[in-house]
Image: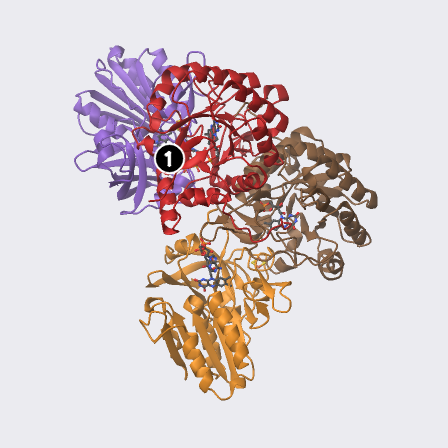
Chain colours: A brown, B red, C orange, D purple
Amino acid sequence: MVDLSAKIGDLVLQNPVMVASGTFGYASESADLFDLNQLGGIVTKSISLNPRAGNPPPRIFEVAAGMLNSIGLANVGVEAFIAEKLPFLRSLQTRIIVNIAGGTAEEFVRVVEHLEDESGIAAYELNYSCPNVREGGLEFSQDPSVTQKVTAQVRRVTGRPVIAKLTPNVTRVSTIARAARDGGADAVSLINTLVGLAIDTETRRPRIYAGKAGYSGPAIKPVALAKVFEVAQEVDIPIIGIGGIFSSNDALEFLIAGASVIQIGTANFVDPTTGIRVIKGIERYCAEHELPACAELVGSLRPWCDNDTSS
Amino acid sequence: MVDLSAKIGDLVLQNPVMVASGTFGYASESADLFDLNQLGGIVTKSISLNPRAGNPPPRIFEVAAGMLNSIGLANVGVEAFIAEKLPFLRSLQTRIIVNIAGGTAEEFVRVVEHLEDESGIAAYELNYSCPNVREGGLEFSQDPSVTQKVTAQVRRVTGRPVIAKLTPNVTRVSTIARAARDGGADAVSLINTLVGLAIDTETRRPRIYAGKAGYSGPAIKPVALAKVFEVAQEVDIPIIGIGGIFSSNDALEFLIAGASVIQIGTANFVDPTTGIRVIKGIERYCAEHELPACAELVGSLRPWCDNDTSS
Amino acid sequence: MQKSNEASPAGSRGIFDCRVLSITHFSNQIYSLRLSCPDIAQKAEPGQFVNLKVNQDLFPILRRPFSISQVNQSDGWIEVVWKIVGVGTELMSRLRTGQVVSVLGPLGNGFTIDPDAENAVLVAGGLGVAPFPYLFERLVAMHRRVRVFLGARTGSELVLTQGFSRGNADVELATEDGSVGFRGLVTGPLVTFLDKTEHLDSVQLFACGPTPFLNAMCEIAKKYQVKCQISLETTMACGFGICVGCPVRTADNGKRFMLTCVDGPVFEAGKVALHG
Amino acid sequence: MQKSNEASPAGSRGIFDCRVLSITHFSNQIYSLRLSCPDIAQKAEPGQFVNLKVNQDLFPILRRPFSISQVNQSDGWIEVVWKIVGVGTELMSRLRTGQVVSVLGPLGNGFTIDPDAENAVLVAGGLGVAPFPYLFERLVAMHRRVRVFLGARTGSELVLTQGFSRGNADVELATEDGSVGFRGLVTGPLVTFLDKTEHLDSVQLFACGPTPFLNAMCEIAKKYQVKCQISLETTMACGFGICVGCPVRTADNGKRFMLTCVDGPVFEAGKVALHG
Ligand SMILES: Cc1cc2nc3c(=O)[nH]c(=O)nc-3n(C[C@H](O)[C@H](O)[C@H](O)COP(=O)(O)OP(=O)(O)OC[C@H]3O[C@@H](n4cnc5c(N)ncnc54)[C@H](O)[C@@H]3O)c2cc1C
Ligand SMILES: Cc1cc2nc3c(=O)[nH]c(=O)nc-3n(C[C@H](O)[C@H](O)[C@H](O)COP(=O)(O)OP(=O)(O)OC[C@H]3O[C@@H](n4cnc5c(N)ncnc54)[C@H](O)[C@@H]3O)c2cc1C
Ligand SMILES: Cc1cc2nc3c(=O)[nH]c(=O)nc-3n(C[C@H](O)[C@H](O)[C@H](O)COP(=O)(O)O)c2cc1C
Ligand SMILES: Cc1cc2nc3c(=O)[nH]c(=O)nc-3n(C[C@H](O)[C@H](O)[C@H](O)COP(=O)(O)O)c2cc1C
Ligand code: FES
Ligand code: FES
């Protein structure tokens, strides 16, 4: 028997496979497709203080080996989330991580405050790809000091694990990860979507209403792996790896690069049971390679050379 | 007849289609495959002061809709370039842009100085994705002040057009583009490769000797378009668009996003005549859309909305 | 057919690996596919759709949604009909008997047949005809009087016309180039029909086709004060509510959205604001 | 066959759209393809390769290199032989007669036949046999005495063995599992042969196969002081020198590199340092 359990600080998971925010709705949508309790964890859609209608269409567009989206953080708002969505989530035997969106530090804090009295929440994941309304739309985690400050403010109001979900759209993501840790984050999730754009050459309009959009899917996997590896080398904080995971082999790459846990995003749209396939595949790999625990894989990359050879 | 000519400052091109540095060798390799003079321009491999052997294998790896590479800037060095490669390039009836690599500002300057007396060079393109040996391997254009300083130093020693080729691996590429312009660059090329990583889960080794590698191909196109659009909106400097261009439709997206000229990279490996196809396709599109000049397309994107809707 | 995910409860929608029983080429770019899929055949309602993964590759990566065109519960198959418009539909046209396709479904809310509507009127623009054979069969089984108006740009794009000859149905055809039937838009013959119909409250319209056509249908429904259900298409990633990528504006103030995949694809005309 | 780029000078290498004349399935995973390509057939030398784009999609995106296995100048075709190892070779196995493949070639430097070597010895590990039928034909035409040693893991992976029965050639087979011929590595029978051969200066070895096998061949060539040419495989993007992605270390100090695609794929044993 392979030990598949995974740890993020004090949070123990039965296996290292979660579904990613915004790619699994509120989980009930897939409940009749497979046994959700097999997952290591479920991350909810981003929840904001008030309900958000989201962006006008078009919201999604397929590109080579990936997709663009700008949903506009459509969600029911924290109160309706607690009333209508949390009861089902709470009934599951897997870890529920509530992902939180905010335009200001205060909004993050207030959503957490709303959720603090509710049971059945294993951790909070803070969506730091949200545009910071005070900084001209810069994503929160594009600035290390903002990242640290917001994290510290949330840290003050909760004893639950806090996971900072970082944007990849930065010069050095390890600087941001360090700031999140210094602010009190228990872990970082990497990566949220890359900024991307596609254009309809007939109409000369962007393919997505908002213009620039979030890029996800297999196409971003190499970038995500590089970011995970960078943080794993530079910062002493557990990492949740995300980006283009469609198969167990993809997931294994993330573990080897340094992620303790991984999340499945876009793949859920193609096959919502991807997580189950990935769990089984990791187990099979460990058995075949005589690894008693999949945690042994974490950060086990063997570089060919020490230094960064110039490209 | 469609006017296909394009301009980068004072540099006039017969059409807006170049081949990108490092993806077309020294041009002679393809001379028997098609008439090179049909291209708008040819950018050479990165030339450094001294010859470089490059990295050990594996240097390349295919990923979904793209490839990773770390060649290690293998090149013959500026003296052998002048003696052995430039004579052929000079004999062509298209614009020759010499791409320059350096580990320090001085190296960039010294390579330019070597080339200044040589005829047949239309412009220099400075490869600012090179690791800056003085800054712990940070790519030159990951820092705006370094970008400005190096550009200004090169500017001082040449009257030829100077093009700063920027890395996409930054928080805000428009800040870097502005720094390049302030340093005296005539144009910016965007984008060089994204940083990516892939891992062989059997050996747990990186798929590329150097570990992290440069990611190119269709998979990076949405990122490149977003970067081009950002700079086009923010900075008043001509842009050369690069990233995953395989078809004329891809090229048109870049023109509409704000690039005056485009470069074909990875596609040359699959079909070195891609540039010719792209030129013909742009011409056909302009004819069909009754555009007398393809320059009219540049920056003609029609956003659905003004503001950045949050993702 | 094999349910690829064994954990999912029997009888519900699911993800199925379905064998191609046959593929038919109607005209230039139009095809139909019969898939062995007893579970979906058992459960599907007219107007519902399936989301197909037509290849095993990463390109194209997303599933492609198609209306369930016909169902045979006893033989356990469903049919879809499509036109080649891009890479996914092109790949589908290369499928061969015996190959396996991953099918997610049945998805969405189908047509709601009004208990009081004696006269069902089916109106299709182009491949909007896709969901009608199954809807037609259901209506005939319910002993409704059915009229079918099928329009297309040209005769070769008028497909499935044979499927409506059972029961006491009338079929009227229209083509923009006049090559078959009425020359002009299909709304022409429809309006003529409505003009001469007395008990409009016994009529229910069912419309499927491109957005401009659906807009025209909503106008007509409003003008004649007649019940009308429309089936929408939007880009979709998941097809069952988890990507939130398929919004359609509500008619009330146009600031709220419903999801085409789970709130539709069939909507009551007047409940949604198409285009803007 | 049609040259897809009309601008390229006639008679030189080029990029050609070539029709599949036939595809043959040898054993489990091994196939051969005959492509109509008069230009390449005209020009190709034994040991050269072609770089094939096996699909029109972006996945897989790069071409795949294959040795030219056989050539027929009068009928204007070339053949390649491959084993399914991944997505590209799998796609190739689904090609059908009449389909078109983009072929870039002929590429690289082929074998150089030593004017003094009366005895040519061809040694293949596994699919390393691929370039040998054409080389064999050339050697026979040059009236050389040819010996062929073919090894594989098991009998079903020993392919093309029939192709060497012309002229006064000897063919020896070896399989690791002993299912066909000598049980063991193909270097076994080769060494036995060399041990009993008197005029080793009249022998030239030609070797193609996996790297460990080539290393063994280099050792043998060195030990017996016999001329030896080896054909290498590395990952390739372009196949003609523009990506600089296919380095092989030179033997001198191991710090310099040559390019497998333009300096090879055939090298003189001892000129390159394999593996490290
Ligand atoms: C609920 C629903 C039911 C559908 N039923 C049918 C059906 O029964 N038969 C049928 O032929 N088609 C149907 N469609 C449309 C079908 O899904 C698309 O034609 C298909 O996804 C296009 O895939 P592609 O890869 O060939 O095109 P792509 O390469 O993705 O796109 C090619 C072109 O088609 C356009 N396009 C993409 N998606 C759609 C879409 N959803 N509607 C219209 N144009 C689109 C794109 O804008 C682009 O210009 C339905 C769509 C929905 C949402
Ligand atoms: C000059 C040259 C001539 C060749 N001639 C032949 C030939 O005649 N017949 C033949 O079957 N093959 C030949 N090869 C190897 C062939 O090119 C590869 O098997 C093929 O590219 C694999 O493509 P794929 O998409 O199926 O595999 P991928 O999906 O790209 O890779 C699958 C697996 O195969 C391995 N692989 C990839 N490329 C190579 C390679 N070049 N060599 C060995 N393993 C590889 C990968 O590491 C991976 O583990 C030749 C290669 C070169 C460079
Ligand atoms: C349609 C869509 C909606 C998303 N919504 C959210 C969200 O609300 N909050 C969030 O933190 N991330 C969101 N993401 C990002 C994903 O959680 C994930 O980080 C990203 O897609 C990369 O993983 P993938 O390539 O596996 O999809 C969304 C992604 C997609 C594709
Ligand atoms: C194999 C390879 C080698 C490259 N070498 C260089 C180089 O020497 N100098 C440089 O400025 N860019 C180099 N590039 C980057 C390309 O010029 C281009 O910016 C990048 O690949 C993105 O374009 P593409 O997606 O069209 O390939 C290289 C790219 C590849 C794939
Ligand atoms: S298609 Fe995903 S929510 Fe509707
Ligand atoms: S394969 Fe591109 S240089 Fe050899």
Residue A50 coordinates in the image, percent (x, y)? 73, 57
Q: Is mark 1 within 8 Å of ligand 4?
A: no
- Reading the image, the residue beneath label 1 is B14
Residue A76 coordinates in the image, percent (x, y)? 70, 59
Front residue of C91/A175: it is A175
Front residue of C103/B249: it is B249
B215 vs C178: above or below: above
A114 vs B225: above or below: below
Number of numbered tags placed on the structure image:
1
Instruction: Using residue B255 as the reference point, say whether residue A10 is left or right of it.
Output: right
Residue C260 coordinates in the image, percent (x, y)? 56, 63
User: Which quadrant is the C terminus of chain C positioned in?
Assistant: bottom right
Disc 1 crowd rating (10 Å Cα; few below 14, some 14-19, many 20+) is some
Instruction: Using residue D140 as the reference point, say whether residue C122 is left or right of it.
Output: right
* Element on which disc 1 rests: loop
Task: Write down the quadrant of residue D116 in the picture.
Answer: top left
Residue type of the residue flagged with mark 1:
Gln
